[in-house]
Amino acid sequence: MIRALCLSLLSSLAFAAPPKLAALAQAYAKKHGLPVRVVQRDLGTRQIERHFVPVLPKTHDDFLATFQIDKGAIVWRALGQDPVHPAVSIHPNLALHYMHLPATPVAAHDAGGYYLTLAVDKKQFDHWHRFIKKWAPDEGQIYVTNYTMPGTKVVHGGCMWWLVHAEIAKGLNLATAMGVRRAKGPEVLAPRLIHAGNELVGPIGIPVPSIAAFKKLTDDELLGPEPAGGAAEQVKL
């Protein structure tokens, strides 16, 4: 009972007063004369509402400037041809990539993909960055063999383990904070966040060459394929 109470308290603290990422998306869209599309889904235990905005070549940098750590957000940047190795943008010209070094990854306009915003504040990011520096220093890729999340067995992972097993507060995993089950790889976790994440999963930028191309996309194309096992099975309350 005490453990359950502690978990409940942790959850309430983690989800308190999330940044208004939807409002940031509306401001970005209004600034550039872009549409915002809203897709809703009922998972039974959770109502999902995702806001999608186009990211044009000329608005790309402003999108990353709109959703940055100083405004309570990070951006998961996944290229269509390589969902295993996304980058996480912190500022417009600073991102963490699979070598953990600051990087400026190529935009996704030619490769497809999406820019998934997540409500992470500066304190949480600083905790995460210390966590990365401790277990995977910038000198190169390593396989983690002795890191243990609370209540789990020892974690084994490759170059992207730091994203999948991200700890944004002591004992709080990124996936858990976003309301989904943890996964073994980014290509598995990302669809869970999109289809089943809680209110901390923010608007999703879709790199397209034009507004017309964005408008042609169906709701299912915006959401992308459901995670294996179905969206409802990925919810972690």
Image: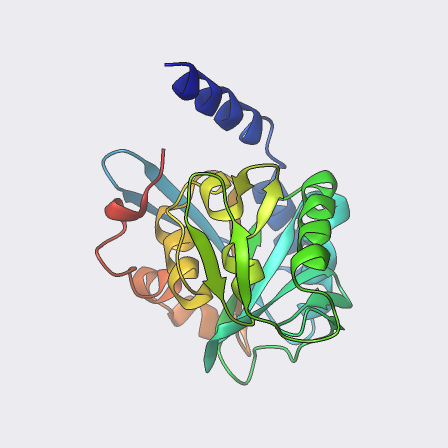
Depth order, front residue of 225/33: 225
Q: Work out whether residue 34 can be spotted.
A: no
Point out the image quarter for the N terminus: top left
The answer to whether residue 154 is left or right of residue 134 is left
Q: Is residue 12 above or below residue 154?
A: above
Point out the image quarter for the C terminus: top left
- Asked where in the image residue 141 lies, by quadrant, the reply is bottom right
- Asked where in the image residue 187 lies, by quadrant, the reply is bottom left
- Residue positioned 63% across, 44% down in the render: 120
The answer to whether residue 181 is left or right of residue 120 is left
- Residue positioned 43% across, 48% down in the render: 50
Depth order, front residue of 115/215: 115
How did the renderer colour the structure?
A: rainbow
- Residue positioned 23% across, 54% down in the render: 230
Q: Is residue 199 above or below residue 137?
A: above
Q: Residue furthest front?
A: 146
- Asked where in the image residue 42 lies, by quadrant, the reply is top left
- Residue positioned 35% across, 39% down in the render: 236
List x then y, in percent, for residue 195: 35, 52
Q: Is residue 73 above or below residue 14?
A: below
Depth order, front residue of 164/228: 164
List x then y, in percent, for residue 53: 53, 59
Q: Work out whether residue 101 can be spotted.
A: yes
List x then y, in percent, for residue 70: 77, 46
Tally the marks.
0
List x then y, in percent, for residue 63: 67, 61
